[in-house]
Amino acid sequence: MLWACILLPQLAMDGVLRQRADADSPLALLAGPPQRRVLQAVNGRARALGLRPGQTLTAAQALTRDFATAEYDLAMIECWQQFLAAWAYGFSSQVSLHYPRCLLMEVQSSLALFGPWAHFEARLRGELAALGFRQRITVAPNPAAARVLANAHDGLAVTDGRTLHQALGSLPVERLGLSREVATALVRMGLRSLSQVLALPRDSLARRFPVEVLAQLDTLLGSRPLALEFYRPPDVFDARIELNFEVESHQALLFPLRRLTADLAAYLAGRDSGVQRFVLHLEHRNGAGSQVQIGLLAAEREAAMLFELARGRLEQLQLPAPVLAVRLVARELPPFTPEHRQLFDERPQQSLPWEQLRERLRARLGDDAVQGLGARAEHRPEHAWTTQPAVLPLPPCGPRPGWLLSEPQPLREASVRILAGPERIESGWWDGGDVRRDYYLVETRSGQRGWAFRALGDEGPLLLHGWFA
Amino acid sequence: MNDYAELHCLSNFSFQRGASSAKELFERALRLGYRALAITDECTLAGIVRAWKASQDSGLPLIVGSEMRVDSGPKLVLLVENLSGYQALCRLITQARRRAEKGRYRLLREDLDAPLDGLLAIWLAEDDARHGAWLRERFPERLWLGVELHRGPDDAARLRTLLDLAETLGLPPVACGDVHMHARGRRALQDCMTAIRHHLPVVEAGAYLYPNGERHLRRREELTELYPPALLDETVRIAERCTFDLGQLEYQYPHELVPAGHDATSWLRALVEEGARWRWPDGVPAKARERIEHELDLIAELEYESYFLTVHDIVRWARDQQILCQGRGSAANSTVCFTLGITELDPTLPDRRLLFERFLSRERDEPPDIDVDFEHERREEVIQYVFRRYGRGRAALTAVVSTYHGAGAVRDVAKALGLPPDQINMLADCCGHWSDQAPSPERLAEAGFDPDSPLLRRVLVLTEALIGFPRHLSQHPGGFVISEHPLETLVPVENASMTDRTVIQWDKDDLDQVGLLKVDVLALGMLSALRRCFDLLAHYRGTRWTLASLPQEDPATYEMISRADTIGVFQIESRAQMAMLPRLRPRRFYDLVIQVAIVRPGPIQGDMVHPYLRRRNGEEAVDYPSAELKPVFERTLGVPLFQEQVMELAMVAADYTAGEADELRRSMAAWKRHGGLESHRERLTTRMLAKQYEPEFIARIFEQIKGFGSYGFPESHAASFALLTYASSWLKCHEPAAFACALVNSWPMGFYSPDQVLQDVRRHGIEVRPLDVRHSGWDCSLEPAGDERQPAIRLGLRMIRGLREADARRIEAARREHPFGDVEDLSLRAGLDARARERLADAGALRGLAGHRHRARWAVAAVEPQLPLFAGQPAPREAPVNLPRPSVGEDLLTDYATLGTTLGPHPLTLLRPRLAALRCRSSRDLPNVESGRPVSVAGLVIGRQRPQTASGVIFVTLEDEFGLVNVIVWHDLAERQRRVLVQSRLLRIDGHLEAANGVRHVIAGRLRDLTPLLAGLNVRSRDFQ
């Protein structure tokens, strides 16, 4: 077997740069707590300004202020690794992320498909470059050797044991994948290269170093196998139904749709997850297909509900051409939290469960028309609510009207009676919208209760701000 | 309109809650016509002395109190009625604070079971009515129900509920304000502090913010509108009951130091007489006798005997333990302190013109301040002695109130306003390090901020307001308060962050106000070094020197000082000091006093340095503004340099009394923060004009007084320091080996690293021997060096980075039994683990047992823990292996990495051929270069300094194999080549030489980074990167 190691020396930086339009301006990635931000990676232009990984942000700013910063994001790095592994999976069925920021792939069995190694390598490099990832590639008879050779070489392909011995022998001990302490110890003994170490009696080494050291050397030289865990592509639900005839009406699409949503529900149940978003692809004879996006507010997996939703969205679509096939792809499969039902469900048969009503409303009126409501910890009434879930804790406050007018309206004072107040609210200086108001609980002649205010120092009429239910 | 007294009010000593200072609160309360103001900070009296001061200044009575919440119980305000109430409150706070970690408190229900006579309580009822009944038992006839109305949702309903509750429980209701700020305008700051307290941005802190700004000192019209008259009248009745005043505190210094048959006065006299015989074995000179009598009279009149006895006791104890110590500061003005051995300088000697009034005066109603320096490594012993001697109940450290400086304030405010961390850091950078000002618009614009944006304007306004606010209490490093009675009857005591330390809630200024005496137990590294040096010499030469016995006025020593050969010497070793020495050329002790004081921001900013130098070198005539001032300024050639001279000037030329002059000194130190110099300007000007002084001279003197500001150096302080300067110089001059050895062993201290001290001593021809486990102890030591007059220095194991002292001590002990045979023997007998063995091998300390570093490392790696079964069995035989010998360059780099110094060739020696090819001169060549000529030099950068006083100029110090090169980099160049300047470890300077009066500088014209040459010394760098 032959193993290629694709080392991604700038993975974090490349991952950020490929998303930036100004990839050529100086950029540094930062990590560490706010009091001590440290440069984790810098691009070429930043390096030219004297910025180096390991510098503190303060030190860097002492040099220049002329650079942009972004977060060194471990989750993103993991994401890119997965992305690239999926890419590599297209070339080899044995891909491993055993070493961080590095792809290992078995290439011997792929040579038949992708041509001799020189061609194959060029293709790999070409595609990586197009994706925006810098790389170093080496090949060796075992994955561990390929990995350490990549520390010192780029483009080296070693295919036989003897050459491997030579190539490894000249590597410095710091680059053999040994722990830092062991490498330091070897250097402090004057041993700089692997060949110097291998020249020493094995039992003398065994006496001085932990067993892992000889094990690692054996692995490098191929006399001891390395246990690898291979990459497996992520789970995606992707099903397609080809229709036997060209369908032109929505009505006729309902059957395959019901099948697909039912299959999806079964699949979800099998892996105990829900779906938050899925896509229907409608394939036409000519031209691009149509897509219908179905998004949910929460993860669901009930077949009838999924069908209902998909149908609602599908019916809004004008079919541009007859449909030949329907495909359902679901990628977002978050865990599902089932609701608890009472043993004897007391709801009337005709009523729609709340969730289903909510989703049907959303399907009919549009996603933006139906929103959740939450409270915010704010004293200014107009800022005290949000469409996001409530942020806790909330400040203690007096009674607040259920219906807040979007614009306060002047109130004819003669028509109302003041029941309580003033309740003074002075808050909000931090965003330039400071308010200073005295609020009153008022009652109209008809007995309706309202909430009205007057700004401090203002002589004008009371302004009605909301109605109590 | 009803009379009103506010009974529930927080100052900014309720950290991150109260948004106004006591001064602001009292001033506003007075303006509003309040009858009294209680300061009730949350479970603390840390701000009460300031409140007391504010109350005296405004004339509005202060009620001492505290707001507290009982652990899972009611919240209440306690007010002090009389002295016993005050003591009860101190006790409660102490209990609650001692129980919790620093900065928090925990008051338990049972704490209120103790007698609480003299404490009044206001219950701030929340929901549980049962608390009321429980409190009523604890405070019979002394409990009120607090009614606090802040224009909430329905004040009328709330008032009804509370009045009903009061009725039911039979408690009198009273109005209070829960005041958090003096005026409504502080609302934003108060919100901001709340957010800071909860570590949230203001936007997200809504749950904790008050809904409005009503928690301020409200006008009485408003209160009348809100509260029924009876509730307001009740506040005044309570206020009238609270007659306690902090002035009633009676503090007594400990009495146990006086033996039976004596009182404090007679015992102090006895000790002084005994000391006088010791100081003047040939009889006390008349002048000294006169001073002693004068001082003793004053001390007795002011009843400070016990204070002197206490300090004497501590100093005597330290001496008994061979801990070197010396009084610093104004105590050096006192002959009594000199005879008691607290200070070392005789204030009655002819060229000393020290002012006793600077130390103790009748007018100044304030205790004296004796600060004593101890060896920095042994101060803890002294502190523990004090705790032992007086017990924790009677001795505690004083607090330091940490206040917000510019950077900290802007950081907290910016965080509360939700700025991202990177921008917060940049904002903080825009503040000077200890600046008390918000960043200037120019600095902000330079850093890319828009100072006019609304957000930044908010940040700046709030920062400005927050600066100077107290932030938290920390412990003073060595300021002690000791009392005859338990301290908690005087002031609450709380935990410090260090374990086993307790701190009172007042800081130094507070103590002065209340009349408590404090002893400062300070730490000074040089004292450790001097004591070590005396010990080394006693051991090596059999002569025991003391500070007092060193030969005085030694010409060779002054010669050395004048050459600026002062690395390691106390105080005069900095770049600026060294640049001044060849110009000032000290010849006698008093010159050192001046030298120590003159290179300071005060004299430099007041432009006193150059006139003094010109006069000293005879380039300018010495003149005096008037004949009467001649005696004042004679010793400094007519240039005012010392605080004491300013005081004397005021006394002589403006007829100040000694006490008034001291008041002037205090204003001088404080004017930047508090102002208050104006009255002196008027007084000085009027009186001096009347005596025919030139207005110009008066104006200049006044500018100089301001220049002294907080930097002003008292002569007595300079004199105490100069004594140590002289002692360390003498030792460096005559015993360079022992002195360097002591410095290295006392590190960290001083300006220079052990490497620089050792390079310096080697340049002076002293042999330094390498580490060797067969010879080295933990400390560096002295060894005979052939027939040389000076011994050699043997490096100690303390030089090895990461080696533990305990390992080294075991090596010492094992070696005393018998010498080590090999590495195995060493490891087993000294009980060394792998880590210690590796450190020794890498440092080259095993050369005598195992050969060069590589072999040593190979050898120690084979040492295995011996199992009892195989004890005594020889280790398995191994075939010898061939390991490469380290190169010179490798050894050098490993030396620096493991020891921080090298005894091999200096790195520059190895690089010299290449530097010579680059036409770089060495420091040895520079004396041969004419001033003004172009020159190139290169060296290791050992110092970059930007003196506060020099505008933008940077001093760089380079070291090469022969010595140091002083480089001046002007501001423009520094900006242009900032990167090279900041990053280079090996730097080349192209520029020109400037030499005058034996001072040589290279003025940089261009900087080049030669650091890569250093890496070239390392073989490893040839490897593939």
Image (tube, coloured by chain):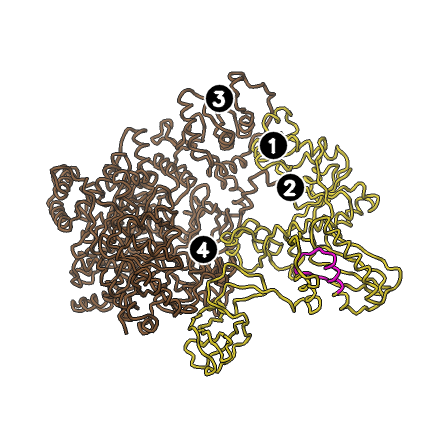
Chain colours: A yellow, B brown
Viewer-nearest of labels 3 and 4? 3
Q: Chain of mark 1?
A: A
Determine whether label 4 and label 1 are within 8 Å by CB.
Answer: no
Q: Which residue is mark 4?
A: B969
Sequence-first disc among 2 and 4: 4
Q: Position of residue A403 (x, y in %)?
A: 55, 72
Q: CA distance from mark 1 to mark 3?
A: 25 Å
Residue B617 visible, this orientation: no
Q: Dot 3 falls on which chain?
A: B
Measure the alpha-carbon separation of dots 2 and 1.
16 Å
Label 4 – label 1 distance at C-alpha: 44 Å
**Between A41 and B401, which is closer to the camera in this rendering?**
B401
Amino acid beneath label 2: Phe
At numbered mark 3, what does the secondary structure look like: helix, strand or loop?
Answer: helix
Give me the C-alpha separation between circle 2 and circle 4.
37 Å
Task: Check disc 1 and give the amino acid type.
Answer: Leu
Name the subunit of mark 4. Answer: B
B906 horizontally vs B557: left or right: right
- Screen quadrant of the C terminus of chain B: top right
CB within 8 Å, label 3 to label 2: no
Image point 70% across, 46% down: which residue? A136
SS at circle 4: strand
Which residue is identified by label 1? A191
Q: CA distance from mark 3 to mark 4?
A: 55 Å
| Nearer to the camera, B265 or B571 | B265
Question: Can you give x and y, in whole percent of width and height, for residue B434 in the image?
Answer: 39, 56
- What residue did someone put label 3 on? B825
| Few, some or many residues within 10 Å of mark 1 (<14, 14–19, 20+) | many
Q: Does B102 appear above or below B629?
A: above
Q: Are marks 1 and 3 on the same chain?
A: no
Reading the image, the residue beneath label 2 is B1024
